[in-house]
Amino acid sequence: MSTDKNMAVCDCTVIHEETVERVRKEMPHERLLDGSADFFKVVGDRTRIRILHALFQSEMCVCDIAVLLEMNQSAISHQLRVLKQAGLVKYRREGKIVFYSLDDEHVMNILDQGLVHVGHK
Amino acid sequence: MSTDKNMAVCDCTVIHEETVERVRKEMPHERLLDGSADFFKVVGDRTRIRILHALFQSEMCVCDIAVLLEMNQSAISHQLRVLKQAGLVKYRREGKIVFYSLDDEHVMNILDQGLVHVGHK
DNA sequence: CTTTCATATGAATATCTGTTCATATGTTCA
DNA sequence: TGAACATATGAACAGATATTCATATGAAAG
């Protein structure tokens, strides 16, 4: 029976089984939950959120971003890779210089709401 | 001069100084950036985002959540503490049982946009 | 082709973070 | 008061992650 399994897993008795089942049915799909957790994780970093807000103002090369954030070039480059893999930024090459820009303008709506949320505290 | 300082910090020459200055002026304040990064970090976790989506459906006790997510009670309790400290959940006590619920409905708008973002990929 | 400069990348490291285990707290009920 | 149960908490551990350093790649210019 399910109660035994639950006790083994959670160290306690099911208290409101109907609630659990009702909520379970309404939960978003696993891949959506994991995907959005991954997305928020990418955005939930001091350096990366600064890069995104900067690129919202203007496309910039790696060196510009490094100067702006007072960090070394390598750190920025590593984080740009994370952002690129997440589909949040894109780049174009112009000679030696690589210009990064936002790849998903919609994301800024979410970031702005994050600012608003903090502002309301 | 600032160029020397920048070279020391970022291992490269400033390429577009005007761009950097213009972007710098428009950047959100440090505390907002850090605050929203912290907020997204809290939300950017598999377990915590599941808890929040669950509580959006219904208030639940710790044990219910543990059963729902098939995790042990202690892990859930630890994460609820993180969510509480972030101001995202609140609780009420009813005898031995502690019921958790969302403390900030507005946050669900942001979480929903996260789901939408993932859905569009 | 060699030098120079912007960027990328791999390895190493230090820090952070999530889960587990053991146990404490606090409430109910006999 | 003491047993039973829900929850909280601290310590320990494992895995993840951000930054740095050294170096590689790749493009332009001499």
Image: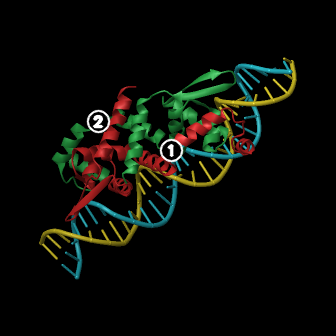
Chain colours: A green, B red, C yellow, D cyan
Q: Residue B73: in sight, yes or no?
A: yes
Is B5 situated above or below D1?
above
The C terminus of chain A, quarter of image: bottom left
**Residue A52 % position (x, y):** 51, 36
Residue at the spot x=42%, y=33% of the render?
Answer: A107
Residue B79 position within the rendered picture, expressed as x and y whole percent measured from the top left: 37, 53
Is residue B43 among what the camera can see? no
**Amino acid bearing label 2:** Pro
Q: Quadrant of residue A2?
A: top left
Task: Count up the numbered dots.
Answer: 2
Give B66 or A108, whichever is nearer the viewer.
Answer: A108
Image point (67%, 26%), residue name:
A97
Query: For the residue marked with disc 1, what is the amino acid?
Result: Asp
Left or right of residue A79, residue C6 in this image: right
Q: Nearer the viewer, residue A93 or B88?
A: A93
Residue B44 position within the rendered picture, expressed as x and y whole percent measured from the top left? 42, 43
Q: Secondary structure at mark 2?
A: loop
Residue under label 1: A45
| Residue at figure coordinates x 30%, y 45% from the top left | B106
How many C-alpha atoms fall within 10 Å of the one at disc 2: few (<14), some, or many (≥20)?
A: some
Residue at the spot of label 2: A28
Q: Is residue B31 above or below residue A89?
A: below
Q: In 3D space, how far apart are the residues under numbered discs 2 and 1 (Cα atoms)?
A: 25 Å
